[in-house]
Image (spheres, rainbow, N blue to C red):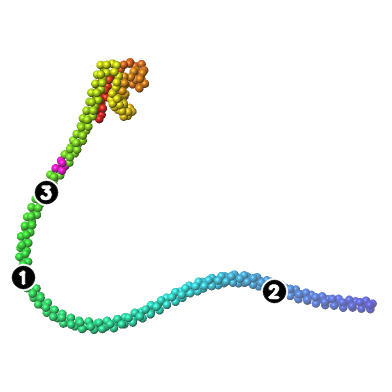
C-alpha cells in the first residue's frame, strides 16, 4: 500500500509536475502564439515596407535616370554655351583689338584735327581781316551801284522809247510776214500740182521704158525667126532641088547628109509622146524610101495596111497619106512656128 501510495504520490507529483509543465507549456505556447502573431504582423509590415522600399527604389532609380539624362543634357548645353562663349570671347577679343586699333587711329586723327583746328583758327583770323577789308570794298561798291542805278534808270527810259518804236516796226513786219505766208501757201499749192504732174510724167516714162523693152525683145525674136526662116528656106530649096533631081532620074538614090542629119537630130530632140517625133520619123521614112516591112518595124504602119503610102495617125484618130513634099513642107512650117 505504501508503495502504491508512494507510487500514487509519485504519480500525483508527476501529474502535478506534468500539469505544471503543461501549464508552463501552454503559457509558453500562448506566448509563442502571441509572439508568432506579432512576428506575422511584423513580417507583414516588413513586407509592406519592403514593397514600399522597392517602389521607392524604382522611383528613385527612374528619378536617378531622369536626373542623369537632365544632367547630361545640361552638361551638353553648358558645353555648347561654353563653346559659344569661347567663340564670342574670341570675337570680342578680336573686336577689342580692332577697337584699340581704331582708338589709336582716332587719337592720331584727333591730334591731326587739333592741329588743323589751330591752322584753321589762324586762317579764320586772316579771313576776318580780309572780310573787314572786303566790307570796306563792299561799301565802295554799293556807292558805285547806286550811281549805276541812276544810269540804268536813265537807260530804261531811253529803252522804253526805243521799245515803243520797235513795237511799231514789229507790227509792220508782222503784216509783211502774213502777206509772205499767204504767198508761200499759194506757191505750195502750185508746187504740189507740179509734183503731181511730174509723178504722172514719171509713170508715163516708166510705161514708155517698158514698151521699149518689149519692142526690143520682140525685135530680137523677129530677127531670130527671120534667121530661122532663112535657114529653113535654104533647107526647103535644097530638098525641093533633090526631089526634082530624084523625080528626073528614078535610079538616083543619093541623099544629102546634112539634110538627113538635121531630120534625125530633130527626131532625137523631140520628147516621147510629141506628135513631131512621129512626123520626123515619117519624113525619115520618105527620105530613105522605106518599104512596108521597114515601116512596120519602125511603127509607122501596121501589118495589113496598104503599101506605097505613109500611114499617119493624127490626134483625131484618122489616117492621112502624104507625099514626101507635103511631109517636108509641113515639117518645116511647124519647125518655124515652134521656133
Task: Residue at 35% x, 80% y: name it.
Answer: 108
Note whether 177 is above or below 295 in the view shown: below
Whether residue 125 is visible to the viewer of this picture, yes or no, is: yes
Circle on res. 220: none
- Callout 2 secondary element: helix
Residue at horizontal 28%, vertical 26%? 258
Magenta segment, which residues? 201-205
Q: Nearer the viewer, residue 41 or 250?
A: 250
Q: Nearer the viewer, mark 3 or mark 1?
A: 3
Q: Residues within 10 Å of mark 1 (few under 14, many from 20)?
A: few
Q: Quadrant of residue 310?
A: top left
Report the quarter where the N terminus lies. Answer: bottom right
For marks 2 and 1, give the CA distance. Answer: 142 Å
Q: Residues within 10 Å of mark 3 (few under 14, many from 20)?
A: few
Q: Are marks 3 and 2 in contact (CB under 8 Å)?
A: no
Q: Which percent across, then down, holds residue 197?
A: 12, 44
Amino acid at each position: 500500500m505504501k508503495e502504491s501510495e508512494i507510487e500514487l504520490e509519485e504519480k500525483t507529483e508527476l501529474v502535478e509536475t506534468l500539469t505544471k509543465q503543461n501549464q508552463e507549456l501552454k503559457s509558453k505556447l500562448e506566448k509563442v502564439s502571441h509572439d508568432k502573431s506579432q512576428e506575422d504582423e511584423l513580417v507583414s509590415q516588413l513586407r509592406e515596407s519592403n514593397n514600399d522600399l522597392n517602389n521607392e527604389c524604382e522611383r528613385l532609380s527612374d528619378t536617378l535616370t531622369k536626373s542623369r539624362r537632365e544632367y547630361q543634357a545640361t552638361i551638353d548645353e553648358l558645353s555648347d554655351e561654353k563653346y559659344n562663349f569661347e567663340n564670342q570671347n574670341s570675337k570680342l577679343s578680336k573686336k577689342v583689338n580692332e577697337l584699340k586699333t581704331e582708338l589709336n587711329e582716332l587719337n592720331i586723327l584727333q591730334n591731326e584735327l587739333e592741329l588743323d583746328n589751330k591752322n584753321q583758327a589762324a586762317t579764320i583770323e586772316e579771313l576776318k581781316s580780309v572780310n573787314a577789308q572786303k566790307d570796306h570794298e563792299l561799301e565802295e561798291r554799293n556807292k558805285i551801284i547806286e550811281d549805276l542805278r541812276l544810269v540804268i534808270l536813265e537807260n530804261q527810259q531811253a529803252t522804253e522809247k526805243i521799245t515803243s518804236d520797235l513795237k511799231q516796226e514789229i507790227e509792220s513786219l508782222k503784216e509783211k510776214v502774213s502777206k509772205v505766208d499767204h504767198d508761200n501757201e499759194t506757191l505750195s499749192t502750185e508746187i504740189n500740182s507740179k509734183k503731181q504732174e511730174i509723178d504722172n510724167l514719171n509713170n508715163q516714162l516708166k510705161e514708155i521704158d517698158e514698151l521699149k523693152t518689149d519692142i526690143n525683145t520682140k525685135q530680137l525674136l523677129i530677127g531670130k525667126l527671120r534667121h530661122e526662116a532663112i535657114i529653113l528656106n535654104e533647107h526647103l530649096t535644097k530638098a525641093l532641088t533633090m526631089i526634082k533631081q530624084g523625080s528626073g532620074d528614078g535610079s538616083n538614090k543619093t541623099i544629102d547628109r546634112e539634110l538627113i542629119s538635121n531630120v534625125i537630130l530633130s527626131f532625137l530632140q523631140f520628147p516621147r509622146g510629141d506628135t513631131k517625133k512621129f512626123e520626123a520619123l515619117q519624113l525619115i521614112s520618105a527620105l530613105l524610101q522605106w518599104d512596108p516591112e521597114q515601116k512596120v518595124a519602125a511603127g509607122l504602119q501596121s501589118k495589113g495596111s496598104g503599101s506605097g503610102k505613109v500611114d499617119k495617125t493624127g490626134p483625131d484618130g484618122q489616117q492621112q497619106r502624104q507625099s514626101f513634099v507635103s511631109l517636108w513642107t509641113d515639117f518645116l512650117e511647124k519647125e518655124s512656128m515652134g521656133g
